[in-house]
Image (spheres, rainbow, N blue to C red):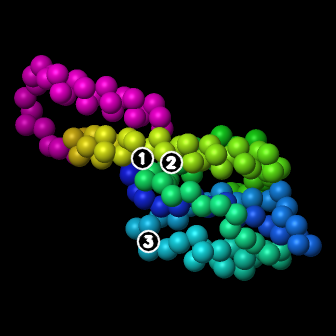
Amino acid sequence: METTKGEIYFIREMEAGQLTAHTKIGLINYKKDRSSSDRLPEHQTGNPRKLVISHVVVTDCVTAVETYMHRKYANLRGLGEWFQFDESSLAEAIGFCEQLAARFAKEVEVLDQSKALKDQVSMGVVGDASAEASQWFNRFVSSSSLI
């Protein structure tokens, strides 16, 4: 899994001065040197209602968190990345997103190390796993289950 720092943003529509249920869950990858505020005008171009950023969650695994959010709330999906949240379900979704981000933050070192190990070229020698190798394997399996 890629550990790319970025933002998960929640953009909401306003109509007649009130927030609507229409909420976009999107991502910004910091490698591309952008922010949610930079992205907002791009969404506004195709939308007749005013859009506002209601919440941003910073995470070390932005793609995984966004994918997880889209899957978890698929039953509330409207079109594309737009979802229909009432205030209660939106608060729950934001809380869940923050929990995911916090959980991945604890695992980022393990994920990066497991990727480095995966990319190492084997010398073709098979040996018994060391205690440390077994520990890393168990942490890798645990991290994979988070995904």
Q: Secondary structure at mark 3?
A: helix
Residue 68: x and y, percent?
57, 44
**Residues at circles 1 and 3 in contact by the CB criterion of under 8 Å:** no
Q: Quadrant of residue 122?
A: top left
Please give the name of the residue rendered at 7% of the width and 29% of the height, measured from the top-left corner.
125
Q: Is residue 122 visible?
A: yes
Q: Residues within 10 Å of mark 2 (few under 14, many from 20)?
A: many
Task: Name the residue carrying label 3.
Answer: 32
Q: Residues within 10 Å of mark 1 (few under 14, many from 20)?
A: some
Q: Residue 51 has which mark?
A: none
What's the CA distance linking mark 1 and mark 3?
20 Å
Q: Residue 105 has which mark?
A: 1
Q: Is residue 77 visible?
A: no
What's the CA distance linking mark 2 and mark 3?
20 Å
**Residues drawn in magenta:** 119-147
In this rendering, the label closer to the viewer, 2 or 3: 2
Q: Is residue 68 above or below residue 17?
A: above
Task: Name the residue carrying label 2.
Answer: 101
Horizontally, residue 5 falls left or right of residue 117, namely right
